[in-house]
Image (spheres, grey):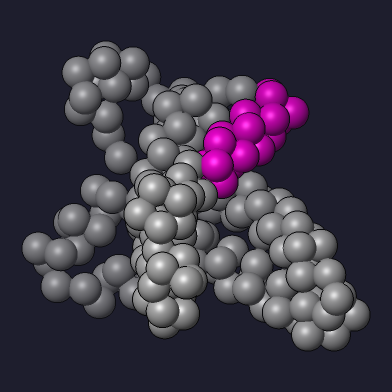
Amino acid sequence: MSFVDAAVNRVPEPLRGLLLRHHELIKFAIVGGTTFVVDSVIFYTLKLTVLEEKPVTAKVIAGVIAVICSYVLNREWSFKNRGGRERHHEALLFFAVSGIGVVLSFIPLWISSYVFDLRVPDVSLTVENIADFVSAYIIGNLLQMVFRFWCFRRFVFPEEMNPDGDEVPGHEEFAEEGLGHS
């Protein structure tokens, strides 16, 4: 029995059913949290050591490594019972969707900064930093997460598979009616 299965078995019954119904979403969120930590640790390690003068380069390197980790973890864990595409096509779609997600995550920050002018000298540095955090890390990441989860299920890993790799029969009928079995 895996660690996750053991943890789920300890949850009281009404909540356990909810966890089992939304297992892909929960795994997706855990992968997101894990890759956020990977991104942050690599970024700050590089920024505070060898790339002290080049924070953007540090962020690009950290972001690329985090997205690669995200693909591997989502492919092998979150959506391991989904497929339907050749690996190279799946990877291309994954990175394209992730790229669009990054753009979506910057939109709230752009609105906060340039539409609402929540920048110094119009507001205090504290207000600017709080606005940046809320718009980029909370609103932006939530927007990106919803978009990426929907796209991953719909386009990147579209077909629900049995553990032996065969497509689940009748999945198309349920998906069209919005009653997919997850």
Q: Position of residue 97 (x, y in %)?
A: 56, 35
Which residue is at a point 61% across and 53% down the rendered structure image?
A: 70
Question: From the viewer's perspective, is residue 106 above or below residue 164?
Answer: below
Q: Which of 173/33 is in front?
A: 33
Q: Position of residue 40 (x, y in %)?
A: 63, 73
Q: Is residue 39 left or right of residue 101?
A: right
Q: Quadrant of the C terminus?
A: top left
> Which quadrant of the view contains residue 96?
top right
Which residue is at a point 47% across and 72% down the rendered structure image?
A: 121
On the question of residue 138 being in view, the answer is yes
- Which segment is the magenta one? 86-103
> Which quadrant of the view contains residue 164?
top right
Q: Position of residue 107 (x, y in %)?
A: 46, 45
Q: What residue occupies the far right of the structure in this picture?
A: 50
Q: Is residue 36 left or right of residue 13?
A: right
On the question of residue 4 being in view, the answer is no
Q: Which of 47/61 is in front?
A: 47
Which secondary structure class fits the magenta region best?
helix
Question: From the viewer's perspective, is residue 78 above or below residue 180?
Answer: below
